[in-house]
Image: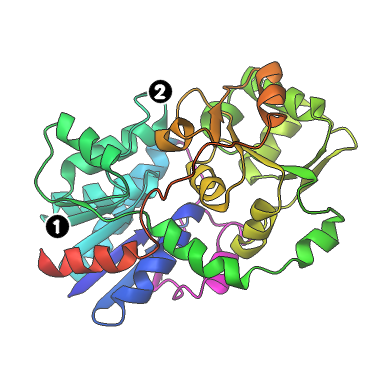
Amino acid sequence: MHIVTIVGARPQFIKAAAISRVLRQRHREVLVHTGQHYDVRMSAVFFQELNIPLPDINLEVGSASHGAQTGTMLAKIEAVLLDERPDWVLVYGDTNSTLAGALAAAKLHIPVAHVEAGLRSFNRAMPEEINRVLTDHVSNLLLCPSQTAVDNLAREGITQGVILVGDVMADVLRLAVDRADPEILRRLQVEPSSYALATVHRAENTDNSARLLDILTGLSALRMQVIFPVHPRTSRAITTVGWKPPDHVKLIEPVGYLDMVTLMRNARVILTDSGGVQKEAYWLGIPCVTLRDETEWIETVTFGWNVLVGTEPGRIVAAANRPLPTTPRPTLYGDGFAAERCVAALERS
């Protein structure tokens, strides 16, 4: 088979690391990087660390409004697909790159396979929710990470081409844990289980000054050291609101995936608005505080390892200080071999 894979943002690089490794053993893959994340700290380091093949094509789209960015991607991806004429277009997750790739392929009648299909926050104010819903409705093969995702699609009338494969991020984490280096802990001068790890990047938090300030107030009120790798968008937003971190909140540059795994697995608690980090916290057995009003990964909440707090500072502090969960932590989202199932599903389709 000839596959064109579309990636453009940090979580997609991680997922592509798993599937490309298996796909390229038997098939031809052309990896297209839209350039949605173009900062080397957010992009190139992931290709290096995770042994992802370098992109065959870089569209270098860069930042813009949602409409402008998606439109530019759509036009450029269409040109690639007209030239490549692949058997399948493979897209990941819920970014503008995902939607542009799916739409470009669908309009050219090229089958679309969507990895991480069926996730729903049921919040249409989120750009990611619009992207994932539209992508699912034009996809031919819907590769779902959980039974909940399968059920979500069924409620929308999508039952054809739906396959439960598990989560490819579990595949990558399984391999990364053995390669992670504790050097970053020494560099940051933190001890295991003594600090909170924070990540904030979603537009609903960074583009809303009141929500962002509430989150920052909550981090400031924690009575433990906070390590906060700052996404470029978040850095700009923090500058705009004029927040100055207290001494115990350490803002650092974005880190590579292996360093992030080290920081996650050694944290006392993780505070995040990232879907991927919520899952990784669960797999690593680290309590999670989700800085959103809803989550696509409801099972992590059901089993008590994740708490939804929105952005209210008091709730953030209370959840971060809660005791370590004693509830069971059953296996969720697959066994670390989802990539093989994704490739097998493509081969059968």
Q: Which residue is drawn at 59% across and 56% down?
A: 42
Sort mark 1 into few (<14), some (14-19) or many (20+) by Cα contacts within 10 Å. some
Return the residue nearer the eye: 332 or 19: 332
Sort mark 2 into few (<14), some (14-19) or many (20+) by Cα contacts within 10 Å. few
Residue 11 seen: yes
Q: Is residue 239 left or right of residue 346?
A: right
How many dots with numbers?
Answer: 2
Q: Residue 194 carries which label?
A: none
Quarter of the rendering containing residue 334? bottom left
Q: In this view, does 121 lie above or below 198?
A: above
Q: Is residue 121 left or right of residue 212?
A: left
Majority secondary structure of the magenta segment? loop
Q: Name the residue under label 1.
A: 111
Q: Mark 1 and mark 2: span between their CA atoms?
A: 28 Å
> Residue 349: where, in percent of width, then height?
10, 63
**Magenta stretch encompasses residue 61:** yes
Residue range (magenta): 36-65
SS type, badge 1: loop
Q: Which residue is drawn at 56% across and 73% down?
A: 48
Q: Residue at x 31, y 79 (%)?
A: 24
Return the residue nearer the eye: 291 or 202: 291
Residue 296 seen: no
Return the residue nearer the eye: 324 or 21: 324
Q: What residue type is labelled 2?
A: Ala
**Magenta stretch encompasses residue 64:** yes
> Residue 318: where, in percent of width, then height?
70, 22
- Look at the image and tell me in which quarter the N terminus lies: bottom left
Q: In this view, does 105 lie above or below 201?
A: below
Q: In this view, does 305 lie to the left or right of 29?
A: right
Q: Residue 125 carries which label?
A: 2
Q: Which amino acid does label 1 sit on?
A: Pro
